[in-house]
Image (cartoon, rainbow, N blue to C red):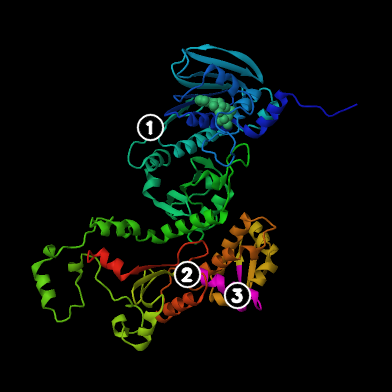
Amino acid sequence: MTVVHRLTEDMINRIAAGEVVERPASVVKELVENAIDAGAKRVEIVTAGGGAALIRVTDDGGGMTREDLALAIDRHCTSKLTDDLLDIRTLGFRGEALASIGAIARLSIASRHASEPHGWEIVVEGGLVHPPRPAGLNSGTRVEVTDLFFSTPARLKFLKGERAEATAVTDIVKRLAMAHPEVRFSLAGSDRSAIDYPVAHGDEPFVERLGQILGQDFVDNSLAIAAEREGIRLSGYAGLPTFNRGNGLHQFLFVNGRPVRDKLLMGALRAGYADVMSRDRHPVAALRIDLEPHGVDVNVHPAKSDVRFRDPGLVRGLIVGALRNAIHQAGHRSATTGGDATLAAFRTGAPAANGWRPAAPAAVAPTSFAAWRSSPEPAYVTAAATGFAEPVQPAFASVDVPSADARANTPAEINQSDRPLGAARAQLHENYIIAQTSHGLVIVDQHAAHERLVYERMKTALARSGIARQILLIPDVIDLPEDDVGRLLKRADEFAELGLVIEGFGPGAVAVRETPALLGELDTRALLVNLADDLAEWDDTTRLKEKLDHVAATMACHGSVRSGRRLRPEEMDALLREMEATPGSGQCNHGRPTYVELKLSDIERLFGRR
Ligand code: ADP
Ligand code: MG
C-alpha cells in the first residue's frame, strides 16, 4: 500500500498562495505589478474591508487576448520569463500570482487586447475556472478579487483589523508609485480616504513623485544622492540627519524599479547615518539602485521583496559612502557643486553649476583693478576681484607652521615635489589634501586613504606577530542593546586577534579594555555600534578575517585620522609618503580612488591656455 500521492493542482496552488499572498496588500502588489509590466500609464485601485472584501485594479495597459487570458490564470504561465532567470527586466516572472489568487479567492479578470474585436472575461472561484465570456471593455485590464482567503479560513484569522490591512495596502501602493513616477496611480474605497498621484511631467519626475507622497517637507529637508560604481547606480534622496523618525517605515528602497525590503540595503542605510544619528532614530530616505539584471538575483522569495546582489560589499560600500559624503557636505550644501559638473562647466566656459562665473576683467571695479596693477605685491588678490564671498585665506591659517610660500624653497620641499604624490600644500574641507607634484597637482581623499593604509597595516601585522594593542587606562563602558552586546561578545576572540579587547559588563553593556595601537585614539562607542550593525548583517559563520577590509575600514573610520580632522603639514606629507610605500593604496577598500591627479596640461586646458 502506498501512502505517497501526488497533490491536486488546486492543493498545489493553495500551498503556493500561502507564500505569494500573505495579506490583501500582497494581492494589490501582484496586480499593480502586472499592470505596470503591461505598460499601463494609469492604474486605479479600489478596496473595501481593508482589501479582504474587495480589491479592484484597473489599468490601461496592453491587455490580453482570449487565449492568453485563459492561460494567465494557470500556474507557471507567464509572458515574461523565457530561459534566463538572471535576466529579469519585469516585476513579475514567476507566473504564479494569478493562479495563487484564484485558488484562495473569487477572481475575475476582464481584459481587451488590441487584436480582439471585444474584451473577454474569465472567472475563477477557489480554483474552479469558468470558461471565458465576452465582456464590455474598451482597452486594458480590470482585475477584481473578492472574498480573499474564503477557501483558506486559517489565513483569514491571521488578518489584522480592516484599518491595519488598509494601511498596508496604502503602503505598497506608495512604494510602487514612487518607483514609477511615469504612471498615474489612484487609490480609493469605502475603507480609506482617496489618494491620487498624477503623472510627474517635470524634469525630475522622481522628486516630483516624492513630493506627492512624502510631502514637500521631505524634499526640502533631504540631500540628493547620486553615485555610481562598477555599473551600479545609486540615486535618490536621503533626509538630513535632523529630519529623522521613530521607526524605519519611511525608508523606501528600490532595485531596478522594484520596491524591496532588503536587510543589506537597510543596514547600509543605517550605517551611512551611524555617526550622525542615535540608534533609536531612523533616517528617512528614498533610494534607487539600478544595475544590470545579472548583478542581482530577485528570485529569492515568492514575494520578490528580497534580493541577493552578486557583489553585496560593493553595493553596501556604494550606499554607505554616498550617504556619508552627502551628509558630510550637507553643512555647506548651498556652496557645494558636483565636481564633474563644475569641471565640465569650466571646460565649456559655461557658468559653474552654482551660478558663479569667473569675474571678467571688465567687471572688476577700475579702482581695485588699478590698485591691483600698481600693488608691489601681486600675490594677494582681493575678495572682490576673485568674486568669492569669503576672503582668500592662507591654507594653513590655523596651523602653527610657516606659510606654504615660506616653505616652498626648503630642500626637503623640493625633494617631496619630486615624489609621485608630491608635497602637501593645503587641506580643504578637513578632508582633501592638495599636493604639488612636479607635473601638476594631486588631491587626496584623506578619509579613503587612511582606511586603506589601516587595512594594509592590519594585514601586515596579522601576518607577522599579531596586531599590537594599547591598554586603556580606564576601560570604556558602552551601553548597547542586549542583542548587540550578545553579537559583539560572541566575536570577542576574533576581535582580540584584530587588537580590540572587549568583555561583557552586565546585560546591556560592553567594556572596551584594549584597542589596536595603530589606530591611535578611538571613538569606541561609535566603533562598537558600527561593528554590531555589521555583525547583524553577516551570518554567524562569517569569519571576521574574511571581512578584514570591512572591519579595518570601520575601525579606521573611528580612529584618529579621518575626514573632519585638520592635519598638520608634516602629518599630510607623512600620509602621502606612506601611501607611496603601500601597495594598492591608489584605491580605498571599496574600490574608490584615494587620490586624483591633475596634470599641469589639464589645468592649462581648464584655463584655455592650450
Ligand atoms: P507573472 O506576472 O509572474 O508573469 P502572473 O500570474 O502575475 O505572473 O500573470 C500571468 C500573466 O498574465 C502575465 O505574464 C501576463 O502575461 C498576464 N497578465 C497579468 N495581468 C495582466 C495585466 N494587467 N495586463 C496584461 N497582462 C496581464
Ligand atoms: Mg505578476
Specify whether residue 605 is in view: yes
Q: Earlier in the sequence, mark 1 or mark 3?
A: 1
Residue that appears at 53% across and 75% down? 521
Please tell me in which quadrant of the rendered image residue 363 appears: bottom left
Q: Is residue 474 magenta?
A: yes
Label 2's element?
helix
Residue annotated with mark 3? 460
- Give the residues in magenta: 449-477
Q: Position of residue 399 (x, y in %)?
A: 36, 80
* x, y percent for residue 110: 52, 18
Q: Which corner quadrant of the image does residue 327 belong to?
A: bottom left
Asked if disc 2 and disc 3 are in contact, CB closer than 8 Å, the reply is no
Q: Nearer the viewer, mark 1 or mark 3?
A: 3
Name above or below for residue 368 compared with residue 47.
below
Instruction: Residue type at mark 3: give it.
Output: Thr
Q: Residue at x 42, y 32 (%)?
A: 183
Residue 226 x/y as whole percent:
41, 52
Residue 548 coordinates in the image, percent (x, y): 60, 66
Q: Earlier in the sequence, mark 2 or mark 3?
A: 2
Instruction: Measure how far apart labels 1 and 3 are at the Cα level.
Output: 58 Å
User: Image point 30% across, 57% down: which residue?
Assistant: 344
Q: Amino acid at mark 2?
A: Ala
For label 2, the residue is 449
Helix, strand, or loop for circle 3? helix
Q: Work out which residue is located at the far bottom of the displayed protein and give it.
A: 411
Decide: is 246 above or below 65. below
Residue 27 visible in the displayed image:
no
Nearer the observer: mark 1 or 2; the answer is: 2
The circle on residue 174 is none
Spatial separation of the CA atoms under disc 1 and disc 2: 47 Å
Which quadrant of the figure contains the N terminus? top right
Q: Which residue is mark 1?
A: 198
